[in-house]
Image: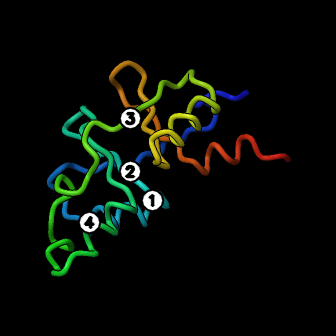
Amino acid sequence: MPTVREVMRSDLIAVRPGTAVMDAAHAMYSGGAGSALVMDDDRLVGIFTERDIMRALAGESDAGRSSRVERWMTRGPVTIQPDATVGEALDRMLAGHFRHLPVLEGVTVIGMVSMRDLARSIAKK
């Protein structure tokens, strides 16, 4: 079974906690990504996803559009090591009900793996 390192994306979309929701959404759209790492300098502090955008915009006012990522992000996201198997990553995502996992080598973010990346790696060719 392939490892996370073999299927992860290393072209990362990263934003700061104070980034406006709309700016983060634009960065994600431009990068073709369903999530953005929320970084405070070199430290991973959260993950901001398409679902977070929906929650921010579904409110009764337009405040979600101008609010900051830190209000909606998932703090301290679950992560995975690059040498974990695709199966381990899939198990972690299914258990946690999420679709994106930051990949850390030690404390350094080196990639992101999505449910789509995992599915492609195990699909019959």
- On residue 13, which mark appears? 2
Q: CA distance from mark 4 to mark 1?
A: 12 Å
Q: Which mark is residue 23?
A: 4
Question: Which corner quadrant of the image does residue 118 belong to?
Answer: top right
The mark that comes first in sequence, 2 or 3, is 2
Q: Is tag 3's residue or tag 1's residue first in the polypeptide sequence?
A: 1
Q: Secondary structure at mark 4?
A: helix
In the displayed structure, does residue 34 sit left or right of residue 90? left
Q: Earlier in the sequence, mark 4 or mark 1?
A: 4
Residues packed near mark 1 inside 10 Å, few (<14), some (14 to 19) or many (20 plus):
some
Q: Which residue is mark 3?
A: 78
The 10 Å Cα crowd at callout 3, few under 14, some 14 to 19, many 20 or more, is some
Say which label, 2 or 4, has the lower sequence index. Answer: 2
Cα distance between the residues tagged 2 and 4: 12 Å
Q: From this view, report whether residue 39 is shown above or below residue 25.
A: above
Q: Which secondary structure lies at badge 2?
A: loop
- Residue type marked 3: Val
- Disc 1 vs disc 2: Cβ atoms closer than 8 Å? yes
For badge 2, the amino acid type reads: Ile
Instruction: Confirm or deny contact between disc 3 and disc 1 (CB under 8 A).
Output: no
103 vs 54, left or right, is: right
Classify mark 2: residues with Cα within 10 Å, few (<14), some (14-19) or many (20+).
many
Mark 4 neighbour class, 10 Å CA radius: few under 14, some 14 to 19, many 20 or more:
some
Considering only order in the chain, which callout, 4 or 3, is on the residue closer to the N terminus? 4
